[in-house]
Image (spheres, rainbow, N blue to C red):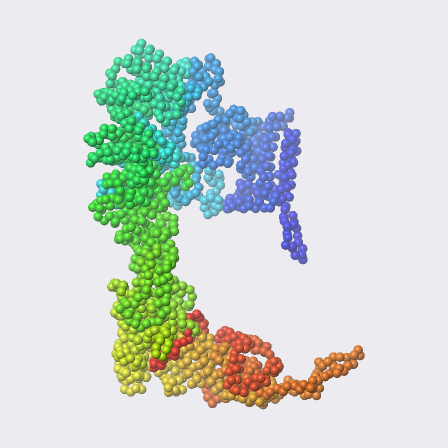
Amino acid sequence: MATFTALNIEPDDQVDDEIDNTKEIQIEDALKLYQAALKLHSQGPAAFPEAAEAYTNLYKSEIFRYPEAITEFDRIEANPELELIDHSFAGDLDAGIGGEGGPSTLPQILYLSHKNHGQFILDCVKSRLTHPDSGTEALLDKPSLDYQTTAALKCFTLALVNDQSDTELWRRAARVAATLGSKRISRYCLEAAVEVDDDPTVAEVDPASLEEGFAGEQLKEQLQVLSDDTALSHPIMAPFEKKKMPQYLKKFMDPYPFLPTPSTFVERNSPDIMEVDNVVKPDERFLIVAEEHSWSALGDALWAAVLSPLGLSGTAITLSIPEIQKEVQSPVTIEDRVMEDAITTVESPMAENSEATASTPATTKQDEALTEVVTTITTTTTVPVAEEDASPSVALPTRKRSQSTAGIAETGDEDSGAQKRSKRIRNRDNTMDGSVDPATQFAEQLKNFVEADENVFAFVNSLLARLGVDDLGTFQQLQTALAKTDETDRVEIVANAAARDLRDILRTWDDPKASTFVNANAADILGSSAASANAGLAGFLDASISGPQKFSNIPPFSETDGLAAFVTSVQDNWKPLQDAVYEWLFAILLQYRSTLWSESLKVAVVRLITFVDGDIFARFQQEMEKANREGDSKLPRMEEVAQTLFELHLDIYSRITNPNSIVPHETRVMTKERLDRWADVTADVVNSRKRPSDDELSLRYLWASVFYATMTDNVSREHKVLCWTDMQTLLQEADKATIELQNNAVMSEISVDAAEREVSRLTTMDFFFNLFQTDNSNPVAIIETLEPVLDPGAACQAADTVDDTATGPETVDNTPATLRDMWKFLKSGSTSLRLFLWSRLREAYTSIGYNTKVFSCHLKSIEVIVADLRSDEFVDSPDEPRRHKLLVWLKALDDLLVKALTIALNDAATCFEIIDERHLRSTCAALGQLNRVLHSAAIFDDEIRVGMTQLPTNPAYSHQGSFSSFINKLREMQVRTWALQYAMVKEATNQCRELFPTADNDLADFLAHVHYCLGLRKCCKASNKIFLKMMKVEMIRLKHVDKWEDYLGQVLFDLYGIRLGVGLYLLEDHGCPTEPLDRRTVLNIADQVIILANRMPMKDLLKHELRPTIERMQTAVGQAKSTPQMMHNLRNYTEYMKTSIRPLDMYKAFKGQVQVDSLPVITPESPLADKGWYFLLGMIALTKFRSQKRLGPGAQTDDMRVGATFMRLQLQFSADHWETWYRLAQCFDYELEEEVMWTADKINNHRSDLVRVQRGAIHCYIMALSTSVRTADDSFGTAEKLSEMYFDFAMRLYASSREPFGMEAFYVDEFEKHMSGAQGMYKKPLHEEMSRYRVWKYAATLFRKSLADQPNRWMTHFMLGKCLWKMWFKASEEWDPQVQATKPSMESVIGSFVKAVQTVPKPRDGRQEPILEPHYKLVSIIHKFVVFGAMPAQAGADLLQEQPFACRKGAPVVITEPADWEPFILDSLKHLRNADKQHWHHRMIARVANIVYAEEHPDPNSASVARTEFMESIFTKTMHIQVWKPDAERPGRHCVYMERYVRYMVRLLVYLDDKARLEQLVKRVRKKGNDFQKFPIVWNECCTSYLRLIRRAGQIPANMDEAFRNTDHAEYEDFCERLNSWCADPAVVHPALDALKEAQELKKLNQNQMKPAPIDDLINDAFALLYTQVAKTLPPTESSLALAQVDGESGSRPGMGPMSLNNLVMDMNGTQIPVPVAFAASEPSRSRKTGISRREILKKAEVAVSRIPDIPRPVAPVRSRASEPNLMLGSNVEASTPMARIDSRAGRRETPGDDGRDEENEQDQDEEMEEERQEQEEREEEAEGNGGEDDEGGEVEAQDKKDESSERGSVHDSADDESDLSDPPEVDEGMFPGLVSGDEGGDEEEDDGEEEEEEGEEGSSPQEETL
C-alpha cells in the first residue's frame, strides 16, 4: 500500500498503520481464486471448462511472479550467469518470506495450486479417455496425451518443489513419468517416496504409510525387471523383500489405471503367478518352485510342499529352479574385499568426523536363523542354523548425482557456498602429477611408530628373557607374521593365528561382529553369572560328549552338481512328492561321509527325515528287500544310507535330550520311536552284510550302537564304562585311522581317543556331579573339591607338576587315580569348562576374603584363554567361527584384565603372596602372547592414521559407528595388558633379585618405553589413564633413579598439564585431557621439584616452565592452617623483631648463640616445610620483585610482601634455616627501600615506621648469622650465599647509621625499665646503646668476612673503605680508650679504595658508562687526608696519578706548595666529570663547589664560580633541580642530597644577592616538598632568605607599620583609595610596590607551611612605606571628594538624605507632607579610636596588590648594583598568557572593596586598637588570625594550581632555551610521586668536615632511574 508523508509534518513514533501489507492482500486474492477453481474442479466434467478458466486466472495472480514462486532451475535457465552465485541466495529468500503474518502461507498456496492443477489436467485426460465425444476432434491421440501428461508432470514437479514430503504426489509423478516412457524419472520419484522420512543407513524401517508401501512395492517390481540386485539389497528395500503385499491391496497400487501401461515394463515370472489352488486337476502336475538353484533351496521347497494343503498326495510334481549363473566369480580374498569396499573412503574413524556417509554395505549380514523341526502340529523344536555365506559384493558409487551428471558446471571450492569437494578428491588433484613413492612416504610417516615399537618390544622381551619367557618376541617378528598370508610353518601359524585374525576382523568389520562383541557377556563366558547356574554341568556334558572339535579337510558339499539332472528326472517321470523327497534324500545322504554339508542343507535333511519319516522308511524297506532279492549293486549304497540315517537320528535325539533343551516330552518320545526303528533296520542291514567286521561301516555301526545303548538313563554307569572300554579295545585292535563325521555333532570322531574320553567322562561323572551340586554357601567345600583338580601341585608333592590346565603327571604314586582321571579329562576338555571351574574357585575365595587367591584365579583364567588362542582346536577351525570365538575371548579377557589389574594396583602389598616363580613365568608368557595379538590392532590403527589403509564408508566404520568403539576397547585392553605385565615383572624383580641387578632402572625404562609407545598413538588416556597413574605412583617410588625428571615429566604433563621443564626430552602432546592436580601428588613430588628448582638460578626459574608448575602445586596444597604452635612461634618472632638491638646479641651471633624460642610444629604441611617448600615459594616471589623494573611506586610490592609471608610461614615450622632468616631480612630491606625511594614523606613524617622496619631487618640478619654458624654446610654455593648475607647485613648497618636514618634504629629511649635505688624509683635503658663507631666497626668486620669468599667484589672493598674512613674520622669522639685504640690506619683506608678501583669492572665497549664511584671516592678521601694534614700532598698526587682516571694522562705532578694542591685536585675532579658523560654523579659537582667556595671565607667571585658549577647540571637556569641517582647510591640518600644542595644554593644566592634565581628556586622547592629531607627546615630557610632579599631590594625598613598607630580611619580610607588608584596605573613603578606584590605572592605560595608572621611583617612594612611616601603625596580622587561633600551635608541635616521619609510622603497634589522626625540627640554616638589594626592593613595591601596590572614596567634604579636586574616575584606566579592574567585579575576584583571592609570591621576596631599596644603579642595574634582566613587560603590554593600549570614564571624564563638540561618539570614532578618516608625526628647530621662526601652504593642504573 503506497503512502506518503508531507514534508512539513513530522511522522509519529507509532508507524503501525503504515505497514506494507500488499503481499498479504495479494495472497488473500490468490487464495480466493484457488478456492473458486477447486470448487469448479470438484463439480465434475461438466464444469471443467469453467475450472480451466479459473485455474488460468489463478496463475495470473501476482503470487506466481514472486521470486519465491520461481524454482532454482528456472532461475538459472533464464539467467545462466547466476549458476556460479552463492547458493545461500535461496536461503535468503526463504528467510525473507516468513515476514509478518500472511506471507507464511505462500508456499502452501503454491504447493496446492500446482498439485491440484496437475490433478485437474489428468482428470480431463481421464474424462476424454473414458467418455470420448462423438466428434473426431475430441479424440485424444498419442501426441495430445503426451502433451497433457507432460503438463501434469510439470505441475507435480512445481508442487514437489514447495513440499517434498508428499509421498502420494511422488507416486503420481512416477506413474505419469512411466506413461511418458521415462524410466529414470519414474525410478527417481519412487525412490524419493520410499526415502521421504527415513534414514536408510541407520536400520531397516517399515513403511510408515500405505502410500509408502505402494511406492516400495512398485520400486521393487521395477528393480526386479532391471535385475538391480545391488539396489534391492539396500536396507530400505528389506521390508519389501521379506514381505509380500496382499492381492486385495495390489489393485489399488496404480494411482492412474486409465493411463496407458508403459511397454517398457515386462512381466516377470515370479513365484506369485505360479501358485496353485488347493484343488488340482487330475491331469495336471503340482509345481514346486525353488528360490535358488541349489540342493538346499530345493529341499526347503519340498519341505514346504509337504506342509502345504496338498500334502503327500499321489499327484505328480514338477520342479522349477532358477537358472544357474553362468559367470562364476573368482575367490575374493579379504584384502580384495577391503579394497573393493574402499572405492569411496573416509579417513580413520578416529578422525574428527561426526557424519556417517551412506554406502552399500561391504558384507551381507550373517544373522542366525531358526529352523523349526515339526513333528506334529503342536510339537516343535528349534535348531540354530546359519545362513549360507553371501557372495562377495563390490561397493558401488553412491546414488547421489554429481554436478557433471546433472549438467551443472562445477565451481571452485571457494565459489561454492553449498558444499565443497572432499578432502581426498582435492588432495588427489593436487598430487596427481607428483612423483613421490607412496611406500616411501608411508614408511617415513610410520617411522616414529616403528622405532617406538621396536624399542618397547626389544626391551620388554629382554626382561622377560631373564625369566625364561620368549613369547613376546620382537616387533620385526610380529611384522613379518602379519605380512605373511600363506604361511606353512605350523609353529608360526599357531603363534600368530590370533594376531592375523584380529587384523582381519578390523579389516572386515561389520554389524554382526559388533553384535558378537557387544552382546557377549563376560560373566556368561567365564561361567560366573547368576543366569548360568547349570553352565558348568552343561559344559562338562558337552565336553564329554563332543570332545574337541577339529578342522576337517573334506571338501564342502556342492549345491549345484547334479541338480539339473535330478530335476529333469523328476519331470520326465510321473513322480509324486514322496518319491521326489526320497530320491532327493538318497542323493544327499550318499555324500554324508565324503563332503561337508552346509548348515542350510543339514536343516533341510533333518526336516525331511523328520516329517516324511514314514514314507522314507517304507520306501527304504522296499528298496532294501529288492536289493537283497535281486543282488543289486545298489546294496552298498543302501547300507551306507541306513547307517547315515541311524547316525542322524542319534544326533537329533541327543540334541533334544541335553540338559539345556526345552523340547516337550511328546516330541522326545516320537523322536525316540524313530530312532529305535532305524536302529533295528540298521542292525538288520549290517548283520546281513558280508564284509569284514573291522571295516569302516562296521566300526561306525558299533560306535553308534554303543552310543545308542549308553544314552538312556536307565543304564548303569558300570555297563556304560564296559561298553566304551570294549569299544576302545576294538578300535585299538582294528588299528584304523580316525573316522571323522563332520556332519554329525555328537559323533564327529570315531577313534581310540574319543572312546577314551568317553570312559574318562563316565569315570569322573560322579565327581563332577558332586562338584556342580555343591552348596555355594560352603566355600571351603568348593575349595577343597576344586583346588586339587585345578592345581595339581596342591594334591601331590611331585616336583615336576605342570601348570594351568591341571594336567598333572599321570604316574604319581601318591596321587589318587580319580584325580589322575580328572586331570586327564580336563586336559582334553573344553576351555569353557576350565574357565567355569576357575570361576567357581575364585568365587569361593572371594567369599572368604582371600584376595591373593582371587588374583591368582584371574591370572589363571587369562592363561587359559590365551592358551586356547594357540590351541589346535582354535587354529584349525574355519575362519569365521574362529574370528567369532576370538571376539568372545577378547570380551572375557577385557573383564579379567580389569579385575586382575585392579587387585594388582590396589592391593600390591599382599596380592603376590602365593604367586611363585612358576606362576610368574606362566602369566608373563600369557600376557606377552596377548600383547602380540593386541598390538596387531595398534599396527592397523597406525596404517589408518597415516592413510596407508582406507576404510569403507559404511555406517560401521563411521565416527559414531561400532568400529570406533571396538578399536577404543582394544586400546584399553592393550594399556591394561602392559600395566599388568609391568606388575608381574616388578614382582619378578623382587623374587629373582639375582636376575635383575639394576631392577629400579629396568622398571623405570620399562615404563618409559611403554609410555612413549602409547603416547605416540594418543592411547595414554585409555582405561581412565590407568597406565599414567600407575607410572606416576611407581616413579614417585623410584625417586633415586637417575634422570628421574625425564621419566616423570611426560607423565605429569599428560595427567595434569604441568611441565617440569628439565630433562633431555621434549614434552609431547599425547591427547590426554588434564585433570586438577591433587594434594597427594604434590606431597609426593614436592621434594624432587624442590631439588630441580634449587639446581637452577632463581632468576632463571622465573622464566622457566617449572615456575607455573610450582604455583599450581601450591594451589593444590592450599593455604596452611594455623595451629597453636604456629601461632606461638609467629608471636615470638614478631615480638623479637620489635625489641631493641642489643650489642651483646650482635656479637653472640658470630658464635651462633642467638636463638628465639619456638615450638615444634606437626601438621599435614610439615613434610613440605621440612623440605623448604615455603622458602622456595618465598624466593620465587622475592626474585620476581627484584627482577621487575620499578619506575614508580605501585603493585610491585605485592610480590615482596608475598615473599615475606612465605618466609614467615617457613619460620613458623622451623627456625633453623638460616637462609630463610636472611631472605626475610632482605624483604625488610626492600620494604624500607620502597618506603624511601620515591618520596620523603615517610622520612619527614613517619620515621617510627622506618625504625620498625630497620629493626626487623637487623634482627633477621642477626638470626641468619647465628643460625648459619650452627647449621650452614661447607659447600661452595652456601659460601657464596653467606658472603652475600655478610655484605647485605653490613650494608644495612651502615645505611642505618647514616642519614636519612641517623642511628634511630639503635636508640633505646623507648626500651626502659623501672629501677629502684637509694634515690628511689627511676628509669634506665635495658642495655647500652650502640654507638656509630661500633656500628661501623661491626659492619667492617662483616665486609671483611664477605671478602673472604668473594675477594673481587669491588662494592665490598668500596664499602669497607667508607666504614674505615668513618672510623678513622670519628675515633676521637669515643670515650673508651680501648675503642679509640681500634682506629684504623690511613693506609688501610686508602688501601680499601685502591682495591675497589682495581676490582671495579671495566667497560666492555664505548657505549657502556664506566663505574666512577670508587675513583671519585679515592680522590675525595685523599683530598681530605691532605687537607687534614694526615697525608703529604705530593704522596696524594702521586697516588692519584697512578689511577686509571688520572688527570694529565697520568703524568707526574709536583706539589711544592699547599696552593698547588687545589688546582690539581680540581683538575682531577674535572677529568672524572668528563668521563661522566651522562652527568649522573652529582657528588663531584658538589665537591668542586665546596673546594672553590669556602663559606668560612666568602668571596663573591668564588661564590659566582660555585653557583655556576651547580647550575651546569644540578640546577637549571630556571632553577629546576636535577639530582640524578647513580647506580650505587643507597635508597633514601637522594632526599638528603636534595636538602643539602638546596640549602647550599640558597646561601650562595643570598650572598650574591640573586633575588631572581632565589625566587625561582623558592617556587621549585615548594612544588617538590616530598623530595627533601627535613622539608620544613628547608622551606623556612628558603622563605627567610627570600624575604631578606625582597626587603633589601625594596629598601623597606623594619617596623614601618608604627605610622598607623595614630592614623584616623577616615583619613586612612581616603589615602588607601588614592593608593589603590595609583597602583592601578600601569606606568607606576616603585620598589616598595614590587616588594609588596612579591611578599603577597609568597604568602599565597606558603600556604601556612611556615608561620606567616615574617611575611606579614614585610607586607605591613611595604604597605606602610607606600602609605607614607606615596599615598600622602597623591591628589584626592573624585570618590574621595564626593565622600567629603556628603560628610559635610550630613553635619547640618542629619538623616535627611534622598531616601528620607520626608521625601517619600506627599499628598494627592504632589505636595510634600512634613513628617516630624525625632533625632537621638540625647544619645551621642560613640567616638572611634584612632589607629589602624594589622588585619586592616593586610586587607588593604591585598586589595592594592590586586589592582596592580600585569604589564611589564621598567624597573626603577633603587640599588647601586645595576648589573643585576630586579626580578618581580609576581610575574612568575601569574598566569602565563594575557587572557589568564585578565581572568585572574578579574577574579581578584570580585573581592569586597575597602568601604565594605571598613563597614564590616568598624564595630571591632576599638577592641583591636587596644590589643595592638604590645607589638610582639599583636603580631602573634594577627599571624594566627590571618592563617585561618578562608578566602585567603582559597586564593592561595588557586594560585598554587596556576603555578603548577605554568612553566615560564618570570621575565628570566626566556633563558631556558639556552640550557641543555633546562626545565624538565615533567621528570621532576613524576619521578618520585609516592615516596614513603619516616618521622621528622632525626638530628642534624654532624659536621664531620665531609658532610657532602657521601655517595650511594646501590641503586638502579642511570637508564632506569632519573630524577
Residue lying farthest to the right in this orientation: 1709
1021 or 264, nearer to the observer: 1021
* Res 576 → quadrant: top left
The answer to whether residue 1208 is left or right of residue 248 is left
* Res 650 → quadrant: top left
Residue at image coords 44%, 41%: 355
Q: Relative to 569, is 1733 above or below?
A: below
Residue at image coords 39%, 79%: 1884
Q: Relative to 1605, is 1176 above or below?
A: above
1747 or 636, nearer to the observer: 1747
Residue at image coords 40%, 20%: 666
Task: Confirm whether residue 479 shows in the render.
Answer: no
Residue 1702 lies, in percent from the top left, at 74, 81
867 or 256, nearer to the observer: 867
Q: How many marks?
A: 0
Residue 1383 lies, in percent from the top left, at 27, 79
What is the quadrant of the C terminus in the image?
bottom left
Residue at image coords 63%, 43%: 26
Residue 1116 lies, in percent from the top left, at 38, 54
* Res 945 → quadrant: top left
The answer to whether residue 821 is left or right of residue 354 is left
Residue 1690 lies, in percent from the top left, at 68, 86
Task: Confirm whether residue 58 shows in the render.
Answer: yes
129 or 684, nearer to the observer: 684
Q: Relative to 1557, is 1241 above or below?
A: above
